[in-house]
Amino acid sequence: MDKIINDLIAYSDEGIMSKTVEKTEKLDVTLFCMAKGTEISEHTSRKQGFVYVVEGDGIFNLEGKEIRMLPGTFIYMTENAVHWIKAKENTSFILALVSNS
């Protein structure tokens, strides 16, 4: 089934929405839509992957380095990388996690 990402983007008034786009044994792709001012606190992922920013403006802190989240930004993460996110404006991004096993 084809999915058009822009058609899936939706924001809650003051929260974070996530939608699974694709999930297989080795790949997990999720669309995140963060309302302006929301944050995802510091955490790690047990898988490597990447973030691709679809729209908005935010900050992605990866291992202490702040990366501006503007449309078209691609951020690669190794497994267990410490990161947090803050949306300065409504911001949507694709998170793809890949299993090595």
Image (spheres, rainbow, N blue to C red):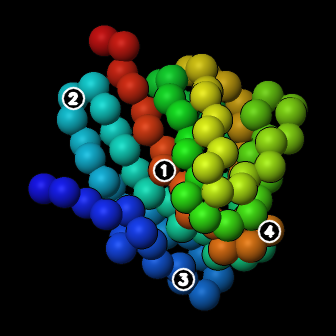
Residue with the mark numbered 3:
12
Distance CA(mark 4)–CA(mark 3): 15 Å
Residue with the mark numbered 4:
88
Q: Are marks 2 and 4 in contact (CB under 8 Å)?
A: no
Distance CA(mark 1)–CA(mark 4): 17 Å
The amino acid sitting under disc 3 is: Ser
Which numbered disc, 1 or 2, marks the residue closer to the eye? 1
Residue 101, image x, y percentages: 31, 12
Distance CA(mark 3)–CA(mark 2): 30 Å
**Mark found first going from the N terminus, 4 or 3:** 3
**Mark found first going from the N terminus, 2 or 4:** 2
- In the displayed structure, does residue 27 sit left or right of residue 30? left
User: What residue lies at 46% left-to-right and 78% top-to-bottom?
Assistant: 10
Mark 2, secondary structure of its residue: loop
**Mark found first going from the N terminus, 3 or 2:** 3
Which numbered disc, 3 or 1, marks the residue closer to the eye? 1
Q: Residues within 10 Å of mark 2 (few under 14, many from 20)?
A: few
Residue 14, image x, y percentages: 65, 82
Q: Quadrant of residue 28?
A: top left
**Mark found first going from the N terminus, 3 or 1:** 3
Q: Are marks 4 and 3 in contact (CB under 8 Å)?
A: no
Distance CA(mark 3)–CA(mark 1): 17 Å
Q: Are marks 1 and 4 in contact (CB under 8 Å)?
A: no
User: What residue lies at 61% left-to-right and 64% top-to-bottom?
Assistant: 55
Distance CA(mark 2)–CA(mark 4): 34 Å
Distance CA(mark 1)–CA(mark 2): 18 Å
